[in-house]
Image (cartoon, rainbow, N blue to C red):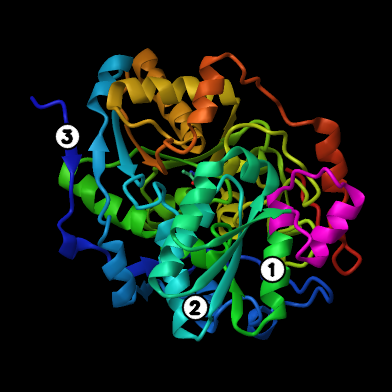
Amino acid sequence: MSETVKYLLPEERLPRAWYNLVADLPAPPPPSLHPATGACLTADDLAPLFPASLIEQDASTERDIEIPEPVRDIYRLWRPSPLYRARRLERALDTPARIYYKYEGVSPSGSHKPNTAVPQAFFNQQEGTKRMTTETGAGQWGSSLAFAANLFGLEVDVYMVKVSYQQKPYRRAAMEAYGARCIASPSNLTESGRKILAEHPDSTGSLGIAISEAVEMAAQRGDTKYGLGSVLNHVMLHQTVIGIEAMEQMEMAGDEPDILIGCSGGGSNFAGCAFPYIGRKLRDGNDIRIIATEPAACPTLSRGVYAYDFGDTAHLTPLLKMRTLGSTFMPPGFHAGGLRYHGMSPLVSHAMDLGLIEAQSFQQTECFAAGVEFARAEGIIPAPETNHAIRAVINEAIACREEGTQRTILFVLSGHGHFDMQAYTDYFAGKLTDLPHDEAALARSTDALPEIQGVKPLISA
Ligand SMILES: *Cc1c(COP(=O)(O)O)cnc(C)c1O
């Protein structure tokens, strides 16, 4: 029997529609609120930041939303992405479990992020946008939007968290190769950046600060819009190509997942795979377990509160009802840039509130150990973020061995780690330490959550 087993869909099986989970949910997600008035957010409120088509997708209750042909055409550069059976890993673990992974590292920027960067750039170009602003932490989102926007002739300004700007010159070079301008954040180009620099001249930045800068610049100019790489409903929607394809590939394999696992920063690669399965679970009642995994140092789903909060540090964004550690929470500097965010997708948070998903958190060294074990068995070196999913996968597979039960596990391999080898270098040098979140800092930042209409919307974790 061949050890290498992969399931490839023919090009014509590339999905024609994205899947919108809201259509199947038993209760609608809570509305987003205006940051100044606390009133329900309207399309007009968002118009300075996003094109109308994306605002419409955010609020849509339709189940299937057509993927425009120019978007499908660019998707074809790497989609449908392969699904692998991890037989060599199964053998290394001596587990009766069957493990499958959907590999999103085959995209031009090496992660799932172009799945939403391409449609965001397309809808912006359709509605006359000339320039997009965005933020990036480790650089995966910035390079994905730079790639996509360039194909549609749009300019891109990327506010990159300063510590990454200094430490990840290759990501910056990748953005510049696609023609984007990369700015270290906090910068003195924006009000938000100048304010931070006045208070903390040595600030190395955060995602929350970079979002404030990008949003501020987009709000100022009619021809400039903002792009967000995770969290928002339209981003979750675009990522569902992952799960739609995976379902068909699992069918080719003649198998069904009992457990689905994805790492979760803002929630998009996890939701992209999980939402089509959650929809099916809601319609057919099958009992798949769906697990989102995250760092113990930034445990948004496992330790956050479900409350209205801002998406950024300067409080320019709408108030979103989400799992949050508080917009003033500064995660410690661990090696999974894409998972260092205080908030979580409102839809993923809502799904958790409805009991449709569970969360697990892990320390970074146990995640790197899992990533290395995976690389030695399967050949792909995963991104540090993805290692949080692989830790959970290996734990479940070991549990199967110990209990003597056969289960099928499916996970998203959200990206390869080729731009993150410094993190592996530090791991091998024994320099990575495990940093649990700081209880006192967490209490302070959740205490500082905004008051809405006199009612502190605190629902305990
Ligand atoms: C950005 C990123 C993540 C985290 O973002 P989500 O929106 O939660 O998916 C995970 N893995 C990789 C490889 C990333 O680039």
Left or right: where 151 falls relative to 428: left
Q: Is residue 328 rendered magenta in the image?
A: no
Label whose residue precedes the other's in the sequence (1 or 3): 3
Q: Which residues are magenta?
A: 186-210
The residue at which mark 1 appears reads as 215
Residue 45 in the image, given as x and y percentages of width and height: 70, 81
The residue at which mark 2 appears reads as 124
**Residue shown at the point (57%, 46%) measured from the top left:** 265
SS state under label 3: strand
The residue at which mark 3 appears reads as 5
Q: Which quarter shows the N terminus?
A: top left
Say if 341 sits above or below 193 in the image. above
Nearer-the-camera pick, 41 or 203? 203
Nearer-the-camera pick, 417 or 95? 417
Residue 391 in the image, given as x and y percentages of width and height: 47, 27
SS state under label 2: helix
Query: What's under tag 2, amino acid-wise?
Result: Asn
Q: Give how far apart the Cα atoms at labels 1 and 3 are.
A: 45 Å
Q: Quadrant of residue 444?
A: top right
Whether label 1 touches label 3, CB < 8 Å: no
**Residue shown at the point (38%, 13%) measured from the top left:** 402
Q: Quadrant of residue 256?
A: top left
Label whose residue precedes the other's in the sequence (3 or 2): 3
Say if 201 sits above or below 384 in the image. below
**Residue shown at the point (56%, 75%) measured from the top left:** 131
Whether label 3 touches label 2, CB < 8 Å: no
Residue 52 in the image, given as x and y percentages of width and height: 54, 83
Q: Is residue 209 rendered magenta in the image?
A: yes
